[in-house]
Amino acid sequence: MAFDLKVNGKTVSVDADPQTPLLWVLRDHLAMTGTKYGCGINQCGACTVTIDGQAARSCNIPAAQAVGKSIVTIEGLSPDRTHAVQRAWAELDVPQCGFCQSGQMMAAVGLLARNSKPSDADIDQAMNNLCRCGTYLKIRAAIRRAAELV
Amino acid sequence: MTKHQTDFAPSGGSTVELGRRTFLVSAAAMAGGLTVGILPAEQAAAALGSRNPGQQSTGAEFTGVVSIAPDNSVTIRTVKCEIGNGVHTGMAMIVTEELGCDWNLVRGEYMPPNRNLRENNLYSKTGGLAYFSGRSTGKEMMEQLLQIGASARERLRVAAATRWGVPVDQVKAENSTLTHAASGRKLTYGEVASDAAAIKLDAEPALKPKSEWTFLGKASRKRINMQHILDGSAVYGLDVQVPGMVYATVRHVPAHGGKLKSYNFDAIKAMPGVRAVVVVDPAEGGRGLPDRVTAPMGMSATTNGPQAAVAVIADHFWQAKVALDLLPVEWDAGDGAKWTTTQSIYTALGEAAKDTSRGNVLRAKGDVDDALKSGRRVEMEFMTPYQDHFLMEPLNGTALVTADRCDVWISTQHAQQAMYVAADETGLHPEKVHVHATYVGVGCGRRIYGDDVRTVVAIAKKMAGKPVKVIWTREETTRQGRYRDIAAAKITATLGDDGMPKAIDINQAASRPIGRNLTDTPYQFAIPNFRGRTKPFATNIMTGPFRGPVFVSNCFFLETFINNCAETAKLDAVEYRRRLLANFPDKGWIKTLDEVAQKANWGQSLPRGTAQGVAIGNWAMATTQDGAPVPFSGSTVATIVTVEVSRRGNVAIPRVDVAFDLGSIINPDAVRAQMEGGVIMALSSSLHEELNVANGAIVEGNLDGYRAMRQADPLMPQEIHVHFGGNSGHDRFSEAGEPPMGPPPPAFVHAYFRATGKWITRKPFMKYMG
Ligand code: FES
Ligand code: FES
């Protein structure tokens, strides 16, 4: 069944079962692979995108629920890697393997959208993503830095 | 004679040792190697994105390792895959030191293993761990890369000198620019690259001595793949798109080593998108490699043999997953069924450790039995569980198999091993196997042997001519791991009147029974009677290398025990170690310990409930043939962990301090990142992680049952301070990834003891605390 999604400012048509998780529609149907699969059960945050400006874990959202809403993925965060979060991430050299980092950055974007000066506790609470490489302390510092750069 | 403990060493290999001269061949000689036709699959790989490492750019080639394009960009091709440890950046940095290019113009690609094979293994002399996997700074690798850089630089100078008609020694090469000072003329490397690449030098230039390096070990460099990560364009195996591909997801027999009894395809046949169910049958076996060809990491049933499995192939992953969840399958658990519970394994393992009637004595000196008869006795029993790598990127791979060619796109730690495994599985000559390595969402040892490659190819070959992307769900990735080895130990000591050990008797059992950082401890030089014994202990559950294999368990056993000896003797644990290490010639140990003690302000008075603990260890230390430690080898790390225990028993870790001696280093920030990440992974696995077994199968599948440390974990260390002052500057460049996995857990246990009076002797600590 075909339906429309609004991704990174563009309306795209998708031919998939609307119950397919948004994550797999993005990845397999739209070939937007910046959004990652880590756990599939709403725990790790690798699949985080923003929907109408709020961070959301796309593995746990049927695509049908995102119809009519504005979805932003890592690919659409900025045209040239200059979003404050991307700049902070680069400045602090946050990533190791990088696999979790799309989700980390999108979760940070969601956090900063609703809390422009988050405390460490706010950050820990809002992020709670898995990074197996253990970049957590850098992530915390980078979010504080991004808050300054916004 | 010294040797490394080679518990998972390469098995030799089919590769040919070539003279030093050979890898410096000119572009003209290389051209032959490049004339192979570009096949559709290679075009697909190129379409992955111009900035990903599997893609091969063009430019004047100095060797396969270095190309310089007219726009002055420098491409450095590495045989090692980027798993997050910065190896891709590190190797490019090494070439840059001698090449004298502008670092901002450097980008990285991978050397395809197939090209390496076609060019007589030019870029991988040993074929094993030393080249296609592991760190950037192995001695041979570094020398090769430095020589390649120096050779290219000299050829650029000759080309510029020829163009200007001036003597070569008047041409300076620096920052990607060639300069003739007298006339003020300048050329970029890119402007003369194609001339230079055709030049053959009469003699290879000598390398700069390390003392004259201007780049390595000086300022830190950011990872060269940063931009791809920032905008999501980095292609990991999971992200590969091959035109026309279909998707598969796989389920293996839950009890490792078991068999498939039956399945019913009819039940799911009509589901949307479903194309087929295919079976992976271990009884079919590999087709074998050509005569006298062996894989660098070997082949065996448990390292990379297939396990019984079924896979559903569908148009899309989600369709395949939904269908596989509904596919009726019956398994025969086989022998593994006898391990009914985790406890049944722990009981048997504990008994094996304590059984002194057998075991392989790795080290013995003095008369331990006699010395144990008198003096103050310290005795402890330890155990560590199976733990999963929990790689951020679940296992996956894409393959296209035809009658005369096999292409594999995969996140791997060893692209060359992957090529041989795919050759074995298909029966194709390795020359017909093309492995396109991608970025890797963490390796930690899990992606070296190629069991994932085999399964991917075994499934794809049943859909010959069609690219198949195989994705393990998280649950399947976790339950089909090659886990951290299970281990137990009983250690007994008697202390002399001075409180120092008179005798230590170590009895360990493990699924990989090695004594690294246990029976080879340099403490033994200060202990008159010392014995270390190991025994193998196996179940059907498969294990494999995992960031510091066995080292992590052994370091926990030994350091906790030594801390207990010091506490029993009422002696300071740092001073206790200084005395134990006093006779060991490698003073890097004490230097590292002193550095961390000073920086962490060891001995300071702390509020009630807060305490510090200490531990030290060495990863990959060499040993003599009779098991004694070899000084100035491996990577030494010392840690002080500060622990806070509230009145209610809540535990927090306000601070961790780390110092190290790796000998020399090339990229300080990359070392810092490995140390910080290692501390967190070490504490995560030691505090929380345990796999349970029921009837021979792993119980936990996902983060709902398997707790790995996340951002909001109350036990997340709030600060990690990495100190560089312990580094000795010794000539070796040792690994930074594994060593921080060892000492933080026993340092935590020591601090917890000092805060609460209780020793924790088993992992995961959370289960045994309070
Ligand atoms: S993949 Fe969505 S939360 Fe883990
Ligand atoms: S950077 Fe590797 S998992 Fe986070």
Image (spheres, grey):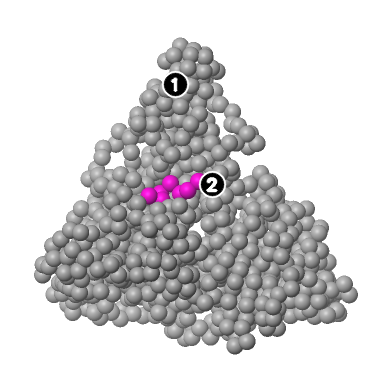
Q: Pointer 2: residues within 10 angstroms few (<14), some, or many (20+)?
A: some
Q: Is residue B307 visible?
A: no
N-term-proximal mark, 2 vs 1: 1
Q: Which residue is mark 1?
A: B186
**Amino acid of disc 2:** Ser
Main SS of the magenta part reads: loop
Residue B115 sits above or below residue A105 on the image:
above
- The residue stretch that appears in magenta: B221-227
Query: Disc 1: which chain?
Result: B
Q: Which residue is mark 2?
A: B220
In which quarter of the view is residue B337 placed?
Answer: bottom left
Q: Residue at x 50, y 29 (%)?
A: B174
Q: Is residue A95 above or below residue B139?
A: below
Q: Position of B204 compared to B230: left or right?
A: right
Q: Nearer the viewer, residue A134 or B714?
A: B714
Q: Is residue B490 magenta?
A: no
